[in-house]
Amino acid sequence: MELRKIAVPLILTLCLTLASCSFIKINRPEDDTDAPDVTAAESAGPDVAPYDDGREAARAEAAARVASLPDHDFQKDTFTVAVASGITFLPSAAADGYDDALIERCRIAGERYGIKFAQMEAPLELMLSDAYSAYLSGVYYADALMVPQSALGELTEKGIPLNTQSVPYADYSAEYYDRAAMDQATGGYVSPAIIGAASRDIGSFRCIYVNTALTGADVYAEMREAVRDGSWTWQKLLEIERGARAADGSPAAVCASGSDLLADAVYSSSGQNYFSCGFGKTPAVAFETETTLAAVDVMRSLFSDGAVFDGQRDGSTALEAFVSGGAVFCVETVGRMLEISAMGSDWGLVPMPKVTADQQDYCSFCSPDAPVFVIPAAGTDPEDAGLAIAALNAASYGYVDRCYSDRLVRTAVNNSLTLDMLDYVCGIKGGKGLYEFTEMYASRFPLFDEDTSGALWELVTGGGKLADKAAASAFDLNWRLRGAFPVS
């Protein structure tokens, strides 16, 4: 598991800016809201259909979805979301189509209930300290928090979140909630996070970047076709990288910021989680499966010839090594695309491959920075908070994601093929983001790294039996989890 540390910016929100479209933004006064020059996506050739993101139809559907929510009289006319620095909830101005969509979804949701949304931004460390003080005093801090998923361990340990199961009229089976992700955040009778379309950040999704100068345009075209017909697997990736390295002699096949991250990438691309979680049950180690064995076989193949660059080498990071032509593939987040674009036109993007050909979805595991909503237990009206977040999710679903391409076109995207493949990463054309209990609670349970990805990594490098590793991990972790998330 990659290092889970939360960077703490040094600047606190100082000023309040009012706006007219059902939102308020509290932001730093020095923020630059000028839009950068637009860089249009280059033509992908006569055989490529123009990219159509379908946003206008999606926006109309979102508005209709919000209109169908139950009526409710809010206690006040402003709903304030405390946002950890680095998370985008409500831009102060629309620098691109993605910002515009975020503002528009707040307008649609706000008009439904006659409220305005306000953003109160602060460094995460300060936010958690202030929210905890408010909790201890039983006073109001904010109507909701928007924090990285990696903060849930500290939040739950301090008792700050309201149990989402206590929110009146909440229907978490609705399509705009990610129920699987919410289950991963849940242990015993503690369900602290609301995760859905309004908190999705495509930039936190991981994907595979491709050095097309090493693979060649024809091979990259074959990869895209495999993605579209559902046959893009790790086995195909291995075949391609071996051919590319044999022709070019490049020093690495696949690079990532750590062997544990690459182990996570392969394992989670199978659609599995390390833990079985859900309301009314204690989280338990759950990776002793046939699919896990298939994932371990993939890891062994990746590392068998020592061609994987998994950390620092000659002072360069994995990403720098890839950009400089030192690897065929790179596992990274969509949010790092701007750095990848330094390669000019010699790169492409595909979703994380499937572990087995019969797997249904492409699965991208989210970084620790992936945002989630939390309702504070103290000083908040649960019904107001639940319906406001429901409206945000309903207004975002199927709409905001389609507008993310605007930001990439302005900064990084080299052609429409990249946007087409991105749709398979974020789920527009088939695929899903995978949230993981280990990412959410690693700060509270330091043995997670050692007993999940570390256990699989030992199988790859040292041999042994999966059943033995799973049993050892369960022995180390399950009793701790029973104490933290009791069910009786």
Image (cartoon, rainbow, N blue to C red):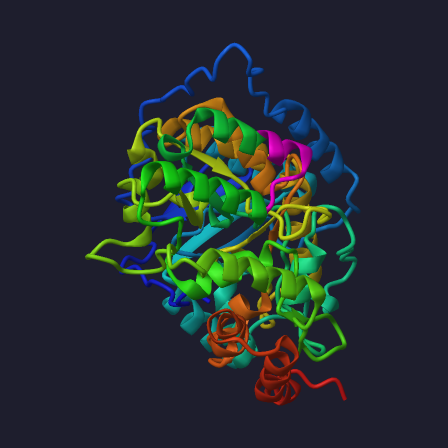
The tally of labels here is 0
* Position of residue 370 in the picture relative to residue 31 (left or right): right
**Residue closest to the eye, 411 or 257:** 257
Q: Given the current orientation, which residue lies at the most extreme top position?
A: 46
Give the residue displayed 36% in from the left and 48% down from the top. Answer: 27
Which residues are drawn in magenta?
225-233
Q: Given the current orientation, which residue lies at the most extreme front position?
A: 246
* Position of residue 74 in the picture relative to residue 426 (left or right): right
Spot occupied by residue 482 in the image (x, y as percentages of width and height): 66, 87
- Does 137 lie within the magenta span? no
> Is 214 drawn above or below residue 150 in the view shown?
above
> Is 59 drawn above or below residue 8 in the view shown?
above
Spot occupied by residue 331 in the image (x, y as percentages of width and height): 44, 50
Residue 273 shows in the view = yes
Give the residue displayed 57% in from the left and 41% down from the top. Answer: 425
Spot occupied by residue 293 in the image (x, y as percentages of width and height): 64, 66
Quarter of the figure that contains the C terminus: bottom right
Give the residue displayed 69% in from the left and 27% down from the top. Answer: 60
**Residue closest to the eye, 372 or 316:** 316
Give the residue displayed 72% in from the left and 31% down from the top. Answer: 61
**Residue closest to the eye, 47 or 235:** 235
Residue 420 shows in the view = no
Q: Given the current orientation, which residue lies at the most extreme left position?
A: 315
Spot occupied by residue 337 in the image (x, y as percentages of width and height): 39, 39
